[in-house]
Image: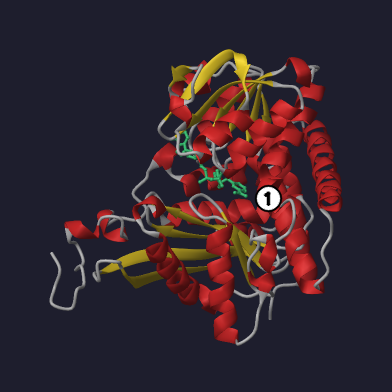
Amino acid sequence: MVDEHGIVPIGSSEGSGSFFRSPLPDRKQGEDNAYANALAQFEKAVSHLNLKRGVVETLRHPKRELSVTFPVLMDNQEVRVFRGYRVHHSAVKGPTKGGIRYSKEVTLDEVRALAMLMTWKCALMNIPYGGAKGGVVVDPKELSTRELERLTRRYATEISVLMGPESDIPAPDMGTNPQVMAWIMDTYSMHRGFSVPAVVTGKPVEIGGSLGRTEATGRGVAETMREALRIRGIDPEKATVAVQGFGNVGSVAARIAYEMGAKVVAITCSKGGIFNGNGLDPQAVIRHVEEGGCVYNFPNADGISNEELLTLDCDVLIVAALENQITSRNADKIRAKIIAEGANGPTTPEADEILNAKGIFIIPDILCNSGGVTVSYLEWVQDLQSFFWPVEEINLKLQALLMKAFESVMECARIYNVPNREAAQILAIQRIADAMMIRGIYP
Ligand code: NAD
């Protein structure tokens, strides 16, 4: 139903894809609530630290939350209303940093959880940022390119009260890509009257993006996987790998794991997946998808469901799709020796208990997928200095920062005798708490 102004009214079924399809934005409960899970992880880590109660209480909550509702003109001249968020968890260490997600499933609690994880991730990597995240409740695949551009430019304008190269710097996440970042950069620049490339990262290289950024997250996943294999005494050339999610992170991680000599036996995306015990060539699967195919109809492979992939008997399970994939409902069936968390929050705290009891080596999200924000940081530095480095230098800098963080997590796990996730969060939270106390409590 459309009124005489062409506006789809609140509550209309034609508004599906807008936030009105879910009247309670935080309807996910218990183990399915990403923020409850992030808080449970936080409580566990913080119990090992001797922090002031007020510091702990501050870090439990986002620093600020912006919720926006905005109209977008669709190609058929209707106006649809969308909901978006931008949440800053902490700005103690510097400008806030975090991706923007376009998905029908986005909720405020999900964005809060992801912003908190960004704070820990940046602190763990020792990069001078606080944590943020943004999201719009939309399935980008339902929009035309022009509609997506209009939605992006309007959302960018709505959050521009927070965004800026010195205050809050978005990046891509699920459902967004370098083109979306280019529109955000252009919109912000138009409002300022001059080009401000450092306002977002993950941009195309033609407008100030960094070489190596697109593959940085997947590269980091593969490199931390290689370290974990070394620790577990498994030769990467003999390792078998299963990959859930074949987007930016999963496809690159699979390709680089394959280049390291590992055998990629299974790949899934949201529509289904493929298995071949003799190994798949991820680059061929990427080509197949680029040419319009789907992962599940790649030739010379058997079909496999997501649930089957998660419980495959393999050395490494790379989870690179979305949160809450490994839960108390399936954790006891996981047979991989190593879990590489390319996605943010893929394992619930209940599942963690089960996996830890089984002795599975988890490379926690804030370490495993930190390659993305690390090269985003390098992109921002290059934009600010207007001087760009070759890809070899980017990859070397990324590897050095990643390996340092990996070693410090292993050391912390040994010292506190805790699983890797707790160790990574202990390190990160301690650094944030220290920074808070050194700065002092204003006024
Ligand atoms: P993307 O949109 O490029 O790809 C997501 C992939 O997951 C797609 O292949 C999609 O089909 C698949 N998928 C969705 N639901 C699924 C399901 N139920 N089962 C199996 N596959 C499913 O997103 P991305 O950028 O690759 O991000 C993936 C994850 O990595 C997210 O959790 C994101 O927060 C995290 N992450 C991304 C970056 C980055 O730089 N892009 C950095 C750090 C973390």
Residue that lies at the very extreme toward the front in this rendered image: 291
Q: Which residue is mark 1?
A: 372
Task: Say if 324 sits above or below 54 in the image.
Answer: above
Residue 76 x %, y %: 25, 66
Give the side of residue 18 with respect to residue 172, left or right. Answer: left
Asked if one can make out residue 370 in the rendered structure from this viewpoint, the answer is no
User: Who's the residue at 13% across and 73% down the image?
Assistant: 3
Task: Say if 409 sits above or below 148 in the image.
Answer: above
- The local secondary structure at tag 1 comes to helix
Task: Say if 120 sits above or below 249 in the image.
Answer: below
Quadrant containing the C terminus in the rendered view: bottom right
Give the side of residue 338 with respect to residue 277, left or right. Answer: right
User: Who's the residue at 48% across and 51% down the image?
Assistant: 175
User: Who's the residue at 66% across and 77% down the image?
Assistant: 196
How packed mark 1 is, by other alpha carbons closer than 10 Å (few <14, some 14-19, many 20 or more), is many
Mark 1 CB near ligand 1 (8 Å cut): yes
User: Who's the residue at 78% across and 66% down the image?
Assistant: 381
Residue that lies at the very extreme toward the bottom in this rendered image: 193
Quadrant containing the N terminus in the rendered view: bottom left
User: In terms of image quadrants, where is residue 201?
Assistant: bottom right
Residue 46 x %, y %: 67, 47
